[in-house]
Structure formats: structure tokens, C-alpha cells
Image (cartoon, rainbow, N blue to C red):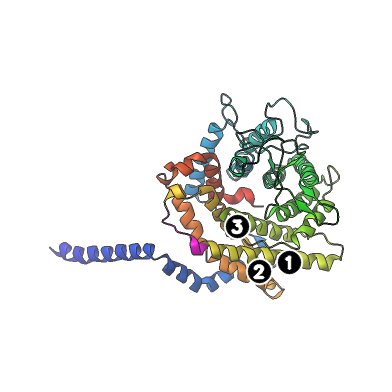
Amino acid sequence: MVSAIYRLPLIISLLAVGFYCVFLARQPWILRTVARRIRNLTLSELFAGKQTLGRMWSEPPDPMRTKYAEQLMQNFASRTGISSTDKEPTRYLWTDSFAVCNFLALNQPEQALATIDSVHRTLTRERSFNKFLGTASEDHPTLGGLRIGKKLNERQVNEHFDERLEWDRDGQYFHYLTKWMFALDQVAGKLDKPVLNVWARELAEVAHSKFVYSRSGMEKRMYWKMSVDLSRPLVASQGHHDPLDGMITAMQLQNSAEQLGVDKEGPMLENVVADYQSMIQRGDFATADPLGLGGLLLDAYRVFRLRICGREVISSSGTDARIATCKVLLEKLLQASLTGVKMFAEDFDAKEPAGRRLAFREIGLSRGLRVISSIRFSEEASGDGEKTSIEALIQLRTFDYLREEIESFWMNEKHQQSGTYKEHQDINDVMLATTLIPRGLLN
């Protein structure tokens, strides 16, 4: 009888808590308000160490997340012919670039190297696989660039341009090439394979020579998509972040070459960096596209990492000017990211059905938010002209709820059965694994 008396208040309390949780779930603005109220509490998390600038911090691995990501990557490797020799390899450059990084994060170096080998046996060659692209060879596989990996052949010279159909046609994308450069460089550093950095720099040089152009008396610009043999543009408009991506990637490759002791081998990229730098001076980086935002956040992280390594944007105005330029670039990237995340958050509907959403685009933002959270400033930096960047980072942390909502939504097996998810399963699975185990993107 006594136990029954105590049981009733307990049941009532549990029901009250349950109703309150349901209420909060239906009123996400309350959670966002609370997040903004506590943003100043995250300030201490952004300070670490006694260095003048700061350091990167990596979130401890979560066993459940790691196991889930490992299963995603195991299925991907089997499905696309990386770990299964009886299957025709189905390579796609963007997806494979992040797959390489995921295998590094999972401490599976053999799979990372097997992916690189499969990509180079497939996408550095013509669609018949019989001939290398351009002047590429076994010893220098990236000299002709890499195909996207689309199912349809590229548009021929005499074919009419169809904007919708162009998305499904092969060719070369600059922003896919930079992702492959990044992946090669990550493996070069983590597995002590310097030749991969040389291949990445060779790819950077050929991509710059084919995608960057200028007409007489006009500023330099970039093509968005080139033919498989890099002889003609397929889409002449410039990608929003392509010059920025090219500059930061080239800087990273040069920095890694020096650390790996191969800076005397392969091309030097100072002129490449300078060209891209001239193009971004007039650029506005802000975007509300979640995939573009994720890339922008990753770029901000890479600029921060380069500053810690002591490398700055190349300039002819002396060391002080170079440092200021890189500091300003980091501020611009963080501010643009913050502006974009705010715009995205205003329109984001977490209750939107899976069939009306694209997982890999949303997960791109989730990945960027997770990567940017690894930045830590030293206490000295708060008084050393870094306040704008620190404030932007603090505000970006208040949007961590977006990351959690996106990840939990797409980890739901019911949502993975939607047509939009299954249609792009390879890229969706790999991107989901990347945001769950981003260590492969970090140094």
C-alpha cells in the first residue's frame, strides 16, 4: 500500500517531464534562445595553452559514432569495389576524397591506400580505362587531372547545352580536384607517403593552368567545369568558392611539402597562390547553401591551421602585411560563415520529410560545424587583434544544435530508406561517416 502511494507521484512526475520534453521539441526556438544565452559560457572553451595564436583540439572519439561510421564505410568499400575484387569499381571523385579521409580516421590505412589506387586506375584515365589523361603516367598519375566519375559521357563539341543533363555528364570539376589534392595530402602526412604530396602539387599546377584564364585587359577568372581532357570549358561560369579553395589548398600543399622534406621535388606553387589571391580580393564568401557553408567552415579551419604552422598568404609587401592578410582572411571566412549559418537556420525545418531533403548537402554543414569546433585560441590572442574571430566562433557554437539535428535525422534508418537518400547512397553514407568521425580532416 505504501509503495503504491509513492508510485503515483513518481508516475505523475515522469509524465510531466515527458510532456515538457515534447513541448521543447516542438518549440525549437526555445532551445536556440537558451543556446544564445549561454554563448558567453563557451568563451573559456575557445582559449587554450600559452601560444600566441592557439591550437587545434580534437573531440575524443565516441565509440558508438565510430562503430556506426565504420559500418557505413565497410558497406561503401564493398559496394563500390574497394574491398571486393569481384565487383566493377564505381568511382566518384568527391565521394572517394572523403572516403580516404574517413579510412584515416578509422585507422584503416590499407583501405585509404586501396581507395587511392582504385581512383588512380579509374579516374585518371579515359572512360575506356586504356589510356591515361594528358601526360599522366604510372609515376605521375595526376598530371592529366581526374574525371568526375559521372555515368554519362561528357557533352561533345557539337551537342546542345542542356543545364539539367549537364549535371549527369562527365568532365572535370575544379572543386573536386581540390578535394582529391586534400585527401592525398592528408595521407601523405599521416602515413608518411611524401610522393602523394608531390602528386597533389602536380595536380594543383595542372588544374591552375587549365581552369584559370584571362582575356586581354580583363581580370583572371576560372571555369567551373572542363572537358575530360581539359581542352575546353563545359561550364564557363566561375564557382563561388573555387579561387578561395584553390588558394588555401595550394598553401596547405606547400606547407606539407616543406614538413615532409619534398619541397624541392615537384612544382612550387607560389604563383598559383598569388593568382588565386588576386581573385578572392573582390569576392564575397557568404552563402546559405549548407554544402557550400560546410566547405567555407573547413576552409576557415585550414587557414587557422596554416597560421599555427607559421605560413601566411603570399604577398610582396613583407612579413607584417602577410600576417595581416591571413588574419583578415580568417576573420572574413568566419564572418561569412556566421552570416550564412544564420540565414540557413532561419529557413531550416527539422520536420521536413526526408524525401524533400538532400542528405549530403545538409551533412556538409554538419561536418563544417564539427570541424570548426576544434579551433582554440590562446588567452593572449584575445587581446592580440583576434577578438572578431573569437566572437564569430562563439556565435557559431550556438548553432551546434543544427549539427545534432541533422546528424540524428539522417542516422535514422527510416529516413535512409527515402528515395533521395538511396539515390545518392554512396555520397550520403560517406559524408555521414565524415561528420561522425571528422578526425581524418584534422591535423
Q: Secondary structure at mark 2?
A: helix
- Name the chief secondary structure element in magenta: loop
Quadrant in which the N terminus is drawn? bottom left
Check contact, mark 1 vs mark 3: CB within 8 A. Answer: no
Name the residue that disc number 3 marks.
Answer: 293
User: Which residue is drawn at the image coordinates 69% and 71% (left, top)?
Assistant: 386
Whether residue 175 can be seen here: yes
The residue that label 1 is drawn on is: 327
Q: Which one is closest to the eye, mark 1 or mark 3?
A: 3
x%, y% of residue 75? 51, 36
Q: Residue at x 68, y 52 (%)?
A: 239
Is residue 348 on the magenta stretch?
A: yes
Q: Residue furthest bottom?
A: 383
Q: Residue at x 66, y 61 (%)?
A: 285
For the residues marked 3 and 2, what is the alpha-carbon distance in whole angstroms?
Answer: 17 Å
Q: In the image, what residue type sits under mark 2?
A: Ser
Residue behind mark 2: 389
Task: Report if the CB atoms under discs 2 and 1 are less than 8 Å apart.
Answer: yes
Answer with the quarter of the image where residue 240 lies. bottom right
Residue 59 in view: no
Q: Which kind of residue does numbered mark 1 sit on?
A: Lys
Q: Nearer the viewer, mark 3 or mark 2?
A: 3
Query: Is residue 59 depicted above or below 257 in this figure?
Result: below
- Give how far apart the Cα atoms at labels 1 and 3 are: 20 Å
Number of other residues with Cα within 10 Å of mark 2, as a class: few under 14, some 14 to 19, many 20 or more: many
Say which quarter of the image contains residue 90: top right
Question: Which residue range is magenta in the image?
Answer: 345-352
Residue 375 in picture, x, y percent from top left: 63, 61
* Disc 3: CA contacts within 10 A as few (<14), some (14-19) or many (>=20): many
